[in-house]
Amino acid sequence: MTRDLSRLLRPRSIALFGGGWAANVVTQLKKSGFDGHIWPVNPKRADILGVPCLASIDDLPAAPDASFIGVNRDATIEVVERLSAMGAGGATCFASGFLESENETTGGADLQARLIKAAGTMPILGPNCYGLINYLDTVTLWPDQHGGLAVDSGVAIVAQSSNIAINMTMQARGLPIAYVIAAGNQAQTGASDLAASLLDDDRVTAIGLYLEGFGDIRALEAFAAKARARRKPVVAIKIGRSDKARAATMTHTASLAGNAAAGSALLRRLGIIEVETIAVFLETLKLLHSLGPLPGASICSVSCSGGEASLMADLSSGSKLEFTDFAASQRAALKAELGPIVSIANPLDYHTFIWGDVPRMTRVFSTVMAETFDLTVFILDMPRADRCDPSGYQCAVDAIIAARAETGARVAVLASLPENMSDHFTRRFMDAGVAVLHGMSEGIAAIAAAIEAGQTNAVAPQPLLLSEQVPSKASILSESASKAALSGFGLKIPRAAAALSLDEVMQKAQSLDQPLALKGTGLAHKSDAGLVALNLVDHASLMAAANRMGGIATGYLVEEMVVGGLAEVLVGITRDPTGIFLLTLGAGGVLTELLADTASLLLPATRADIETALKSLRIGRQLEGYRGKPAADLQALSDAVLAICAYAEAHGDRLLELEVNPLIARAGDAVAVDALIRLNIADHNKEITL
């Protein structure tokens, strides 16, 4: 159900229920200058800060647009039910002790179900959340201090942690914040629904998400599609990156690709820019607010210090930033202004010969900006005003602003240390259309994120493959059964025969072409247990290999060995706890986990996605032909991956994990020489086979 959140987000009347916490909200509303109606409901007080209290909910003069409910969890349900019945616009539920406390056996799940039922069609935030701040309309439905100011436009932040939300409002980086909303445990209204509603406000320039979990994946897809259509960039922090991979893993894939990989792949697929720290989160939002997504990666760095120029180059190494060369005419103009001692290079150290000469500095800066760089960045740390005199640096401020006005270029000022750019100068620059970045590492990461935002595909991706089945008992298919199942979807496999005894091995091997491979069955990771023998070219070597495995293997698989391989590729698919399916492509074979050379996609994946991912791997050079060897057949390799994906999509209701390792890439085809499939089954007594 899509609920109308407009009254809750932009209320003209607010009701408050409770004691001290509700009083705190009144304090914040008066402090922010909210000019709508404030109706505290408290039978024990005559007024709160001069605002008359109502004795009961029945005394409300009208259905409030928004409410803050700061009473205990049982009373919260009663208040929500009454507000919903009278047609209120929405409410914030401050109390905790609902589903988030279910592990403590407090009955939280039942209370949460009752809360949702009581709310009906009325939107609610939380429970266990602070509420919302709307700095555009001076609405502070918030029971604590905050650090924001009224703005005309800005970014909107939705956080699943109230405390993190408070911390973000306290930033001193010049980021204009339009909304801050704490989502709490999202009993009814999820973070995606809140963010989608915020897109409707034309004053919101970008969206920031602080996520502890993804919740409703379909709602997140819908929000991302809406953001893409509105051309508003989205930045996210997803915590939980350090979670260990699933405990119940049978494949290398599952041990390599934990929940963090799936989360990152999900955000990337939806065009949401993922960052790792709060500082980079805020800097990225600020850059996107000021300049929007960057159309390309061509960056020019300008400073009056060789140290700063070198540090910019070093810290940007391996990032998306490209320090492209100056044009010939530009080099000549810069050389004429800066003299023979200054080397004209990007990053540019223009020295201090022109320092203090504002017209000359402006000409130099305008010359730099006139080239088609996607962003010009000036490294500038201002002296601290309490101990120094910043006036000597005013020439740089004036020249940067004048050059930007003259050229209309995308320009940012970057302080190498976050504290070296005061609020005064930050506002001066930003009022002039110059973005300000605090901290060199954070600023470079923000620029890289803005470049990524500019590369987001304008076409929405296909809906994700999702499974709503709850995992239960697992059935593990044998290697031969796994390969046979995948072969039915077009995956090429070697000719093979299963055997239970040594005599049967020798008999069935006669129908196969040498060289042969012999595998002992009964364990998932056969190589680790010595259950794989390769390059068997005669009767004696085959018998010796089978004898070595006899004490461990429960059976045998003898097959024609695949020769002429150019690269070994791992293809794995795992079902994430969210129900999405993660496709992992990487370097295969026995060194898979040691190399950890992987790329992640979500299903369904296109051929173009798969080929791009394969080329991004370190073994991509092997696939393209390396040191005189021929190139692998990339189309055949992609066909093989697509066949594996087709099996997963056909069995998405049961599949838990699947791995083909290795998939041998050759000049004319790709052959799967090992495979393992783990399926979800309802019958817990079904035999599990390897």
Image (cartoon, rainbow, N blue to C red):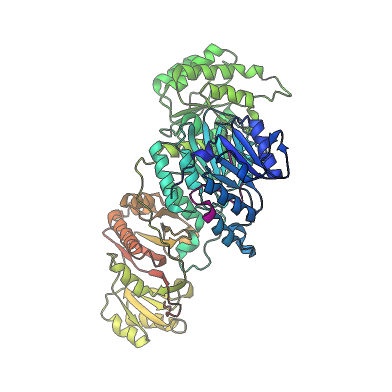
Task: Give the quadrant of the C terminus.
Answer: bottom left
Q: Is residue 468 magenta?
A: no
Image coords of residue 148 (percent x, y): 62, 33
Q: Nearer the viewer, residue 559 or 384?
A: 384
Residue at (50, 35) in percent of width and height = 447
Image coords of residue 647 (percent x, y): 33, 64
Residue at (26, 59) in percent of width and height = 668
Q: Nearer the viewer, residue 213 or 117?
A: 117
Image coords of residue 179 (percent x, y): 55, 37
Above/below status of 642 relative to 323: below
Image coords of residue 213 (percent x, y): 53, 53
Q: What is the total number of numbered labels drawn onto the structure image?
A: 0
Which stretch appears magenta? 116-132
Residue at (36, 63) in percent of width and height = 648
Residue at (32, 67) in percent of width and height = 486
Q: Nearer the viewer, residue 446 or 41?
A: 41
Q: Is residue 130 magenta?
A: yes
